[in-house]
């Protein structure tokens, strides 16, 4: 009996920092640092069909074309490693990552798929191999194969530019969705070449973020995230951004972060700050008053309970249709 391979992958909550950085050789390289979020994720099951053609791959849901490409690439990789002829198979995906918000739903599908295919061969692929296959499957990917470690990641090359530390500083994040949760078509945005001044500014933020991680300084991380979000806002628009930063300031937050390829955003709080519950309630009331839907309040550290403020980041159904564009997660009035 052919065993069923399984694989899982998390999502993220947008970026702490994104820009153009210098690699070890001094070469310019687009990179990002994502904000990890436990909870939502993708799960894949894969059953090989020996004797079938390698392109005889079926998927449920049928529209997950990036995941199917990832399955074909992973089959070729694993077949070569085990000395078996590549074959087709059946892929089944389930998950609760909302699409269209910039939370890495496609990458989550792709990584879960690669892990499931490898598991069906009795293999466990290294993170750099998973990253290479993910980039080939979707042209750029998030560092979800690294399971939440804070890294500066070259999303178009699938490689780590810098490991920033063991863990993000503790944060409490009030998640929300800008633009009513409408998807952002990043391919339609104007492409602006980074200047020397831009690269110097991103490198300064990289240095500050490295220090924030090393010293577990939530306030310094918030400054970096806000500065990066302000730069990202130039391309994304986000007319509510000024309101969001004002809400964060009045509620005593350390800053804000956004998805640079979506509409999800977060107000960042230091969990050690006095009167935290009052600050969170004040933030939620202000978001509601400005018509910005709150989604989930979560932490970057382990707690016994996460507080949810609406179902936008939960639920099983993900919309059908082609990968791009994909319909946004529903965000009911809260």
Image (cartoon, rainbow, N blue to C red):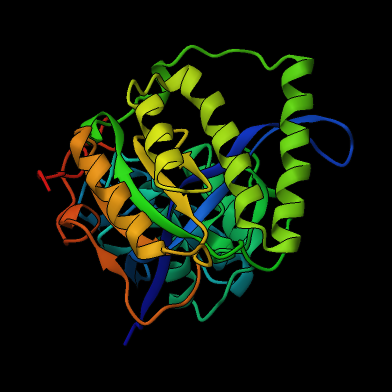
Determine which quarter of the picture holds residue 43. Answer: bottom left
Question: Foreground residue, 192 or 171?
Answer: 171
Q: Residue at x 52, y 59 (%)?
A: 270
Q: Residue at x 40, y 25 (%)?
A: 242
Q: Position of residue 177 (x, y in %)?
A: 29, 40
- Above/below status of 176 relative to 36: above
Question: Foreground residue, 50 or 125?
Answer: 125
Q: Position of residue 215 (x, y in %)?
A: 74, 62
Question: Foreground residue, 95 or 219?
Answer: 219
Q: Is residue 162 visible?
A: no
Q: Position of residue 145 (x, y in %)?
A: 55, 61
Farthest residue toward the left?
333
- Above/below status of 15 relative to 38: above
Q: Is residue 11 visible?
A: yes
The mark tally for this picture is 0
Q: Is residue 81 left or right of residue 233?
A: right
Determine which quarter of the picture holds residue 11. Answer: bottom left
Q: Position of residue 306 (x, y in %)?
A: 32, 71
Q: Residue at x 59, y 74 (%)?
A: 82
Q: Is residue 222 left or right of residue 330?
A: right
For the N terminus, which image quadrant? bottom left
Q: Is residue 44 left or right of residue 180?
A: right
Q: Residue at x 50, y 71 (%)?
A: 301
Question: Foreground residue, 121 or 135?
Answer: 135
- Above/below status of 212 relative to 38: above
Determine which quarter of the picture holds residue 315. Answer: bottom left
């Amino acid at each position: 009996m052919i065993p069923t391979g399984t694989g899982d992958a998390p999502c993220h909550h947008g970026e702490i920092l994104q820009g153009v950085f210098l690699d070890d050789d001094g070469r310019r390289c687009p990179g990002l640092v994502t904000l990890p979020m436990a909870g939502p994720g993708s799960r894949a099951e894969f059953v090989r069909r020996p004797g079938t053609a390698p392109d005889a791959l079926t998927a449920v849901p049928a529209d997950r074309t990036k995941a199917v490409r990832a399955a074909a690439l992973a089959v070729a990789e694993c077949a070569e490693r085990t000395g078996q002829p590549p074959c087709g198979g059946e892929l089944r995906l389930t998950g609760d990552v909302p699409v269209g918000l910039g939370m890495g739903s496609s990458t989550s599908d792709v990584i879960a798929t690669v892990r499931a295919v490898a598991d069906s061969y009795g293999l466990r692929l290294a993170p750099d191999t998973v990253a290479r296959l993910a980039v080939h499957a979707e042209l750029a990917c998030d560092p979800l194969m690294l399971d939440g470690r804070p890294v500066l990641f070259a999303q178009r090359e699938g490689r780590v530019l810098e490991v920033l530390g063991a863990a993000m500083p503790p944060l409490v994040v009030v998640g929300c969705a800008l633009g009513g949760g409408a998807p952002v078509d990043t391919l339609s945005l104007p492409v602006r070449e980074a200047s020397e001044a831009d690269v110097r500014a991103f490198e300064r933020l990289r240095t500050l973020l490295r220090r924030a991680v090393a010293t577990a300084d939530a306030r310094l991380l918030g400054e970096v995230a806000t500065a990066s979000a302000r730069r990202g806002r130039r391309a994304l628009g986000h007319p509510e951004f000024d309101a969001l930063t004002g809400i964060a300031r009045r509620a005593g937050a350390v800053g804000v972060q956004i998805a640079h390829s979506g509409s999800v955003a977060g107000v960042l709080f230091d969990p050690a700050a006095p009167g935290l519950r009052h600050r969170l309630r004040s933030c939620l009331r202000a978001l509601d008053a400005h018509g910005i839907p709150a989604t989930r309040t979560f932490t970057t550290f382990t707690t016994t309970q996460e507080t949810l403020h609406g179902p936008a980041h939960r639920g099983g159904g993900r919309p059908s249709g082609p990968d791009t564009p994909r319909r946004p997660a529903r965000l009911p009035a809260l």
